[in-house]
């Protein structure tokens, strides 16, 4: 059996590679795919979120996320951290020059994507082009509307 010593940047890359593969596996297992309802159809819902006295709206398509939001509204608590890709254009997010695509609920996110809706309003290009995702840690669901 032959062995060789790996050092420097190459060693760091090889140590990081398993983490990247793990993350890719989690995504492949369905975190980005919509869930199906009991009838086999995707449920879509419109959620109004409150963050530090401000609001924004997103669509959710994963039934498990919709259920978590419904329960959080009843309990006046958190459903998790909504996270989605920042895109220019209002769509469902009336009153803001941006909306989120592919929104899911997470337990943990990086701090870089945390903020208030007004932070995105002030610099949509920065958020959409550099940060890419929005994940307000203080978000609480205020309203849920099932769309079909």
Image: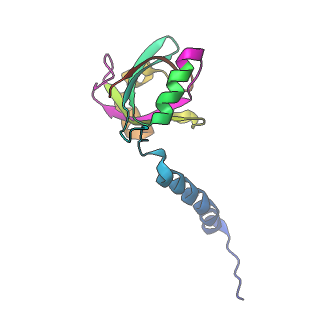
Whole-percent x, y for residue 26 in the image: 54, 52
> Residue 38 versus residue 137: which sits nearer the camera?
38
Of the 4 image quadrants, the one containing the C terminus is top left
Whole-percent x, y for residue 109 in the image: 57, 37
Q: Is residue 132 left or right of residue 80?
A: left
Q: To which quarter of the image does residue 42 belong? A: top left
Can the viewer see residue 102 in this picture?
A: yes
Vertical position of residue 108 compared to residue 95: above or below: below
| Residue at the extreme front of the image, as rendered | 39
Whole-percent x, y for residue 65 in the image: 49, 32
Residue under the point 50% across and 35% down? 64
The span picked out in magenta is 73-97
Q: Is residue 136 left or right of residue 57?
A: right
Can the viewer see residue 134 in this picture?
A: no
Q: Is residue 90 left or right of residue 62?
A: left
Whole-percent x, y for residue 62 in the image: 44, 37
Vertical position of residue 17 compared to residue 87: above or below: below
> Residue 65 versus residue 130: which sits nearer the camera?
65
Vertical position of residue 16 compared to residue 66: above or below: below
> How is the model colour-coded?
rainbow
Residue under the point 70% across and 87% down? 2
Q: To which quarter of the image does residue 1 belong? A: bottom right
Residue under the point 55% across and 57% down? 20
| Residue at the extreme bottom of the image, as rendered | 1
């Amino acid at each position: 059996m032959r062995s060789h010593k790996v050092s420097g940047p190459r060693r760091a890359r090889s140590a990081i590679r398993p983490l990247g593969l793990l993350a890719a596996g989690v995504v492949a297992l369905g975190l980005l795919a919509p869930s199906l309802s009991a009838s086999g159809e995707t449920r879509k819902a419109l959620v109004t979120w409150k963050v530090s006295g401000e609001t924004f709206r997103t669509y959710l398509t994963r039934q498990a996320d919709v259920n978590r939001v419904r329960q959080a509204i009843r309990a006046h608590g958190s459903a998790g951290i909504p996270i989605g890709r920042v895109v220019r254009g209002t769509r469902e997010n009336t009153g803001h020059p941006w909306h989120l695509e592919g929104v899911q609920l997470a337990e943990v996110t990086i701090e870089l994507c945390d903020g208030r809706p007004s932070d995105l309003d002030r610099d949509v290009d920065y958020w959409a082009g550099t940060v890419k995702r929005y994940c307000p840690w203080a978000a609480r669901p205020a309203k849920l509307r099932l769309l079909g």
